[in-house]
Amino acid sequence: MRFPEDFVFGGATAAYQCEGETRTHGKGKVAWDDFLEAQGRFSGDPASDFYHQYPVDLDLCRKFHIKAIRISIAWSRIFPSGTGTVNQEGVDYYHRVFQECHKNGVEPYVTLHHFDTPDVLHKKGDFLNRETVEAFVDYAKFCFEEYQDEVSYWFTFNEVWPVATNQYIEGTFPPGIKYDIPKAIYSMHYMMLAHAKAVLAFKEGGYKGKIGVIHSLETKYPYEDNDADRLAAKKEDILANQFVLDATFLGEYTKETLDMIQSLASINGGSFEVDPQDLKIMKKAAPFNDYLGMNHYQSHFIKAYDGDNDIYHNGTGEKGTNRFRLKGIGERMFKEGIETTDWDWLIYPKGMYDMIMRIQEQYPMYKAIYITENGMGYKDTFEDGFIDDTPRCDYINKHLKALKQAISDGANVKGYFVWSLMDVFSWSNGYNKRYGLFYVDFKTQKRYPKCSAYYYKTVIDRKDVL
């Protein structure tokens, strides 16, 4: 079986990771600007200079038969303070980008929030503050109206769980708080409320096109076949996956989900109470999700753990250093026989298949799934214009095989986006962790196709894996 004729093969980007020009052309600050400067390790400038290089990147899409691109709009490029005065230069910039997409036969799939809340709102608590919820909805309405003739595919948020865990549990995203699980839970809830309100605004506005949300979904397996590890895997799954999936497809939290979430909040010194009015809005919006964006890079094997919170983030590619232990939940383990990347991410394509089929079974009301990110961080080497990233080709090929199996088994998966189209700035890893199909010389901003770009073109042309 080949991929369906209408299956979309794309490449993914994100504004802060590729645009550069983080404080120019009227763009307002985001929390990352000061956060990265304080660390003194690397900067979001110039990144891949997509702000100027987008015609080059879209021409590469055309040449390599990539028909779709994920792009995010930088909220603070439109509203520098999150609300109020509009920066017309930013508005016009995205018009030019979208027009260039269509000129090259590339469909833009546009995300409204990709880890970059404007700094003014972030300082007030980000999505722990309901003011941010309302500001996001107003920003979304503006974009729906402004770009209605150029954008047909919208996503509200990119990766609700990673925003929450990296901000409040792992501490690798601003504001750099660690081990505050109650804050993470509330952050996810209010982002899903903002998503619901934006979906309703889109549908009530009568705009053409479709809308959904993107979740990073990583299958959780018990490390050993015993009750304790099965419970630990269930706990992390509910926190990281089921909580946001319930909110998306049901518009409420099942008793199993709510009981577990409240228990985890209590164990970690807090609580979680839901406003019935929030659920009313979320439940009204749930049937209007046109698709789910699913980002998938790895899965986890979870062992029961009774100790204190203990996390070490491998941000340098020093293999074997990652550590993730959550109080009252479990410990992530390496599994014998399963390969990992240099950043300790398990390479396990079956996890993608299992998650897709789990959605098919548990949330049969879903309409469609796009794999909106999948790819391999790798220490690419550049030798005489040649970049041999065979391990990345193998990684993508294996995951596409798993995806094709899911489609064969009845799942409605409509597309696949490689992360990333070109090399980009990586939030907590800087520039040595490369994901792109196209190598970026960050000094000259020249692009060079990697082996994976030629591999991907072959897959697109064949509509089949190799």
Image (tube, rainbow, N blue to C red):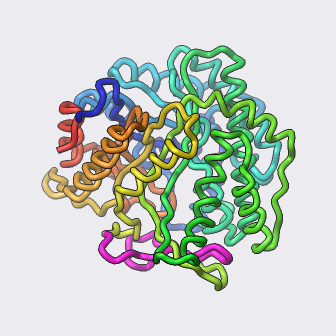
Residue 115 image offset from top left, x and y in percent? 59, 49
* Farthest residue, direction bottom: 307
- The part of the chain drawn in magenta is 311-338
Residue at the spot 49% in from the left edge and 33% down from the top edge: 368
Query: Residue 169 falls in which quadrant of the image?
Result: bottom right
Position of the N terminus by quadrant: top left
Examine the rendering and report whether any part of residue 122 can be seen.
no
Above or below for 437 versus 291: below
Residue 326 image offset from top left, x and y in percent? 62, 75
Above or below for 396 versus 454: below
Position of 362 compared to 438: left or right?
right
Query: Residue 307 falls in which quadrant of the image?
Result: bottom right
Residue 235 image offset from top left, x and y in percent? 63, 66
Position of 103 compared to 132: left or right?
left
Position of the C terminus by quadrant: top left
Residue 151 image offset from top left, x and y in percent? 51, 22
In the image, 224 versus 299, the foreground residue is 224
In the image, 327 versus 443, the foreground residue is 327
Residue at the spot 74% in from the left edge and 35% down from the top edge: 283
